[in-house]
Image (cartoon, rainbow, N blue to C red):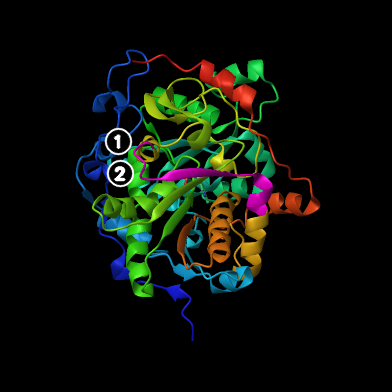
Amino acid sequence: METIQYNLPQDRIPRVWYNILPDLPSPLAPPLHPGTHQPLGPEDLAPLFPMSLILQEVSAEREIEIPEEVRQIYAQWRPSPLIRARRLEKALDTPAHIYYKYEGVSPAGSHKLNTAVPQAFYNKKAGTKRLSTETGAGQWGSALSMACSFLGLECKVYMVRVSYDQKPYRRALMEAFGASVTASPSTETESGRAILAEHPNSNGSLGIAISEAVEVAAKDPNTKYALGSVLNHVLLHQTVIGQEAIEQMALAGDEPDVIIGCTGGGSNFAGLVMPYLGRKIKGQCQARVVAVEPAACPSLTKGRFTYDFGDTAHLTPLVKMHTLGSTFIPPGIHAGGLRYHGMAPLVSHVLDLGLAEAVTVQQLDAFAAGIQFARAEGIIPAPEANHAVAQAIAEALRARAEGKPRTILFNLSGHGYFDMQSYIAYHAGTLENYEYPEEEIAMALAGLPSVE
Ligand SMILES: *Cc1c(COP(=O)(O)O)cnc(C)c1O
């Protein structure tokens, strides 16, 4: 029988998270204080995060031990499966080998639980009572609500308006785990009220929802803030994905020639690729590494690599990243998790170093690829993950055209069973492509803070 799944036993759940920072040829640019433009100290972040996570954010240690309590919760769905997409290979009539690491097996339905659990864990240990956060598509909100319920914390979620309306089941899921969910922009915060005063029908954006969640945490000593992507410690927690994949690819007796992930804030991509990039830096891996972003929100391919705010109301530190400008509000594509104006500083940096490349995919092409994948593999991908699927299929078709074998590995970051409304729209023909919103991005870029 042909092997399809490469599974690891539970005791192979990684014991450490892999921090690529000490292995990089040059350091990350430091985050800056939004007022003084001086490098941030750990105490500047203390109102928002517990010190344990702040120290992980700036750590120079290559390996950071995963607490046993966190590994115990990981054991419910980790190690996640590595699957060889043999039926998709046949459907594409390609000599390529296609593998996907499937993170949709987590009870929250995506990779996001990999960081939600440790974030809730460290907060609980530090005495936090409540976590506030934003969510785009609802994946991160679901994961954090679940983690808070496991660890006995309250959870407050600001959900981007367009997703709140498109994805009522996501909201129901968060509420089932005990979270309080509010559509953003809301009237509950100063940042939300300011946006509504100018744009009463605002679709919202991740940047706006972050402002609301940060504001709430900054004003309440019992509430801390949790972010589902972008920050170093979040990307760090996701490296369990790539560490497992390396072992599983060895079981399969294959080495990837190309490694692919979709990028919103960069966390599922980083989770899969950073352990491989650590090897690439040491000359132990030759794979091309490809980040895939939506054409409607192309921070890596069209953004500027410079200091910008992480949110719309400019409450967060300044970080050096690929950005479309913090005031840019991306079109309402269904891949809500990819609607962010910036990109993780770490992902931006490895792209700048030439260790990775970036491409864009249009919404309709992403859904067409997702359908093709579903018909062959039986899994409906999350709209975000469809971008990675589209690139994996493109690579497989290129291998066929060139008549060359190629081993493709991609991250199937989550399932799409709460996103069926977007598939309904796709089948009804009402889903559309958005052209690159050139003018609005130019305007947002003109408003970048001047640093240096
Ligand atoms: C949130 C999300 C993304 C995008 O966020 P990253 O931090 O770039 O990974 C991608 N896929 C799924 C399934 C998500 O939930």
Q: Is residue 30 above or below residue 264?
A: above
At label 1, the amino acid type is Pro
The answer to if 251 sits in the magenta stretch is: no
Magenta residues (range): 352-367
At label 2, the amino acid type is Tyr
Residue furthest to the bottom: 1
Residue 397's tag is none
Q: Which residue is mark 2?
A: 122
Badge 2 density bin: few <14, some 14–19, many ≥20, Cα 10 Å = some
Give the secondary structure at mark 2: helix
Q: Is residue 207 left or right of residue 31?
A: right
In which quadrant will I find the C terminus? top left
Badge 1 density bin: few <14, some 14–19, many ≥20, Cα 10 Å = many
Give the secondary structure at mark 1: loop
Q: Foreground: 253 or 72?
A: 253
The answer to if 363 sits in the magenta stretch is: yes
Q: Position of residue 163 (x, y in %)?
A: 63, 40
